Each structure stands twice: as structure tokens, then as C-alpha cells.
Image (cartoon, rainbow, N blue to C red):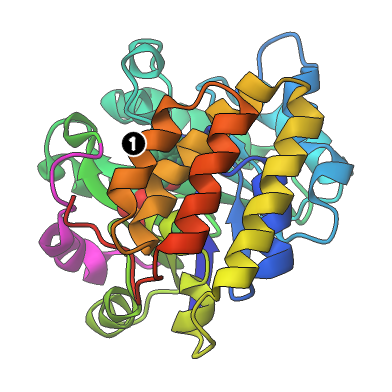
């Protein structure tokens, strides 16, 4: 079974992926946070920092596109293929109000005819060896929408379906609908990946056993909270304090360098810590200090205390 890092906009950017790949093994592919190609058919400098060839050198990376326009998708996919990527992922899961209102992300699940036309146009094009995978939810409002969606997916050579078994209106709040995943599993005949709520080795092993035949599992928040989670699933060692510190420092220094502003770097590190504190016994209290930090000095003070004073937990604590 393969292990994939979920795309997490605002967290798993290029600096994060590089640092993670250097310090922690076990991830077969890193799916990148989405980029939204427009009709201008140029990548913005920000997008290039995410998907440009140097951004992911030596990292098994899969870019993700968020668009409902097949022409824009094909343009971006072609450019990404020229950069050397072997797979491009389509985002059919983003639940954000502004995205869905434009008929993109999970919004594409609302109009089956348009979705079918999109795939028809994409797969009619000469994509060479480029693989097109899809990351989707069960539907917009109800899991009952899924069979009709699956009928469309089944018409096309989708290289892998990544199914996050929630509907759009669940956002990330309602518990993952594992039983719905189990229900639809026998009807899915393309390579399949399960995504959602995997935070411990036991969760991952259970998913592999319960969802037999799946090609892989994808982890997001759990793998940010415990960067060694994939390595542990492979039978490797849990994260040590020193390697976590080195990983943290590489990421933080990267942010300070690339964002050119302490405030910005600290802002981005807070995003990481909103997951990472779970791996430290009693981390919640000191995370509050991190949240208050406005500059490097106060941020570094709080981080030093966490690494110096708090014992590491075996698994992230998700009770809070
Ligand atoms: C802050 C945040 C950003 C996300 N960004 C993306 C994204 O860019 N593309 C995407 O397909 N999913 C995105 N997701 C969804 C995750 O990839 C994943 O499907 C979700 O977190 C459930 O998996 P998990 O429980 O393992 O975290 C995002 C989720 C969060 C919480």
C-alpha cells in the first residue's frame, strides 16, 4: 500500500515539503496544494514557487489543479508535463464557499453533465503518458450523489481516485463517513486511495485491512502533527526530539529567508503548530503562547520552551 501526503494549502508549501522529505521517509507521493490556472495561460510567480521545476527537485510531487475549464486544465497539465511531472491531480473536493460558488472544486460535483463534458474534453486530448488522478468527495450534500458521479468517473482512464468520504457541506467538521467508503468500495474499479482522519499507525493499518484492495492512503493533518507517521507505518522509528527540532528549524529558516519578513514567517509557523503541538505532552498551553507571538523573539522563546520542557507523545493527541 502506498502512502501519500495530502495537499494542504497554507501548510504543505515547497519549504515544508523539502524539509519533510529530508528528515522523514515513508511518503510515496506529495500531492501539492492546488493552483488555479486561468485563461491567461501563464503561471504566476507564486504558483511557480509551488510547482516550478526547482521547487520539487528530487521530491515525488504531484501538482493539483483547481479549474472547471477543460482548456485551462489542458494548458496547465501540458506545461507541468514539460516540467517533468508524470501525474496531475484534479481537485473536486475543495468545500470553500467562494470556490464552490464559481462551480469549481466540490462545486463541480453539482453539474453532472458539465463534469462529463470536462472529462470528455480532457481525455480526448493527447496527454502522452501524463496520468490524471482525481481527488473528490462523496457529493455536494449527500452521499447518495456518489453512484451517479462514479458512473461518470468510470467512463475515463482516471489513474487514481482519491476519495475523501465526506460531502461538501460536511467541510472538515462532520466525522469522516467511513461506512460510506466501505459501501461504495466494491463499485470502484480504478486504483483507489482513501483519505480522511488517519492520525495514528493503528488508523492506517486498520484502513489497509478494512478497505482491502485500495492502492494507497492519504494523510494530511495527522502527518503534519506527527511528521514521522508515514515512516512509522512502514515500521520505522518514531520522531526523535532532535530531528523534529532540525525539521522545525529548517522550515522556519526557509520561511524567514523566503518571506523576507519575521511577521510573515511566524504567521506561517503558527499554521504548522496548530497541528504540531499535538505531539508534545501538554503542548496546548505553550501553543497558546506561540499564537500570541508577533515577532521572531517571542516565537523562538515559546518554541524553545516546548522543545526543552515537554516530553514527546507516542501519537498526536487529537482529543482537543
Ligand atoms: C488547511 C487545509 C488546506 C487544504 N488544502 C487542500 C488543497 O489545496 N487541495 C486539496 O485537495 N485538499 C486540501 N485540503 C484537504 C486535505 O487534503 C484532506 O483531504 C483533508 O484534510 C482530510 O484529510 P486528513 O484528515 O488526513 O487531514 C485541505 C485541508 C485543510 C484542513
Name above or below for residue 159 compared with residue 11: below
Classify residue 167 by image quadrant. Answer: top left
Work out whether residue 9 or residue 98 is closer to the camera in this orientation and state it: 9
Q: Residue 52's spot in the image, x, y percent?
A: 83, 37
Q: Residue 82's spot in the image, x, y percent?
A: 88, 42
Q: Residue 254's spot in the image, x, y percent?
A: 76, 41
Name above or below for residue 300 compared with residue 147: above
Work out whether residue 88 or residue 126 is closer to the camera in this orientation and state it: 88
Q: Residue at x 38, y 16 (%)?
A: 103
Classify residue 125 by image quadrant. Answer: top right
Q: How many marks?
A: 1
Work out whether residue 108 or residue 4 is closer to the camera in this orientation and state it: 4
Name above or below for residue 4 compared with residue 237: above
Specify few, some or many for label 1: CA neighbours under 10 Å numbering under 14, 14-19, or 20 or more: some
Q: Is residue 90 magenta?
A: no
Q: Residue at x 33, y 72 (%)?
A: 315
Q: Which element type, helix, strand or loop, lies under badge 1?
A: helix
Q: Is residue 189 magenta?
A: yes
Answer whether residue 320 is visible to the viewer in this image. yes
From the viewer's perspective, tell me whether residue 190 is left or right of residue 314: right
The residue indicated by pointer 1 is: 288
Q: Residue 281's spot in the image, x, y percent?
A: 31, 64
Q: Residue at x 62, y 70 (%)?
A: 242
From the viewer's perspective, tell me whether residue 94 is left or right of residue 207: right
- What are the residue bounds of the magenta stretch? 172-190
Answer whether residue 91 is visible to the viewer in this image. no
From the viewer's perspective, tell me whether residue 116 is left or right of residue 54: left
Q: Residue at x 35, y 79 (%)?
A: 201
Q: Quadrant of ligand 1?
A: top left
Work out whether residue 190 or residue 76 is closer to the camera in this orientation and state it: 76
Amino acid at each position: 500500500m502506498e502512502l501519500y501526503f495530502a495537499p494542504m494549502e497554507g501548510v504543505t508549501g515547497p519549504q515544508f515539503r523539502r524539509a519533510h522529505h529530508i528528515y522523514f521517509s515513508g511518503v510515496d507521493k506529495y500531492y501539492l496544494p492546488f493552483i488555479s490556472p486561468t485563461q491567461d495561460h501563464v503561471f504566476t510567480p507564486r504558483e511557480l514557487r509551488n510547482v516550478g521545476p526547482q521547487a520539487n527537485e528530487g521530491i515525488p510531487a504531484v501538482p493539483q489543479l483547481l479549474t472547471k475549464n477543460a482548456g485551462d486544465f489542458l494548458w496547465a497539465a501540458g506545461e507541468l508535463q514539460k516540467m517533468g511531472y508524470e501525474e496531475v491531480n484534479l481537485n473536486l473536493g475543495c468545500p470553500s464557499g467562494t470556490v464552490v460558488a464559481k462551480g469549481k472544486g466540490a462545486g463541480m460535483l453539482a453539474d453532472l453533465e458539465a463534469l462529463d463534458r470536462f472529462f470528455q474534453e480532457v481525455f480526448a486530448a493527447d496527454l502522452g503518458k501524463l496520468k490524471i488522478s482525481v481527488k473528490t468527495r462523496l457529493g455536494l450534500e449527500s452521499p447518495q450523489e456518489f453512484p451517479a458521479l462514479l458512473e461518470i468517473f468510470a467512463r475515463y482512464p482516471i489513474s487514481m481516485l482519491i476519495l475523501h468520504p465526506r460531502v461538501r457541506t460536511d467541510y472538515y467538521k462532520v466525522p469522516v463517513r467511513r461506512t460510506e467508503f466501505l459501501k461504495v468500495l466494491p463499485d470502484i474499479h480504478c486504483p483507489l486511495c482513501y483519505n480522511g482522519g488517519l492520525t495514528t499507525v493503528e488508523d492506517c493499518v486498520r484502513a489497509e485491512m478494512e478497505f482491502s484492495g485500495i492502492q494507497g492512503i492519504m494523510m494530511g493533518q495527522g502527518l503534519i502533527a506527527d511528521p514521522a507517521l508515514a515512516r512509522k507505518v512502514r515500521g520505522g522509528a518514531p520522531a526523535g526530539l532532535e530531528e523534529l527540532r532540525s525539521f522545525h528549524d529548517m522550515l522556519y529558516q526557509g520561511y524567514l529567508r523566503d518571506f523576507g519578513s519575521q511577521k510573515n514567517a511566524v504567521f506561517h509557523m503558527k499554521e504548522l503548530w496548530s497541528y504540531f503541538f499535538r505531539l508534545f505532552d501538554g503542548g496546548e498551553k505553550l501553543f497558546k503562547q506561540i499564537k500570541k507571538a508577533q515577532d521572531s523573539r517571542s516565537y523562538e522563546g515559546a518554541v524553545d520552551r516546548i522543545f526543552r520542557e515537554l516530553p514527546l507523545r507516542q501519537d498526536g493527541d487529537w482529543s482537543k
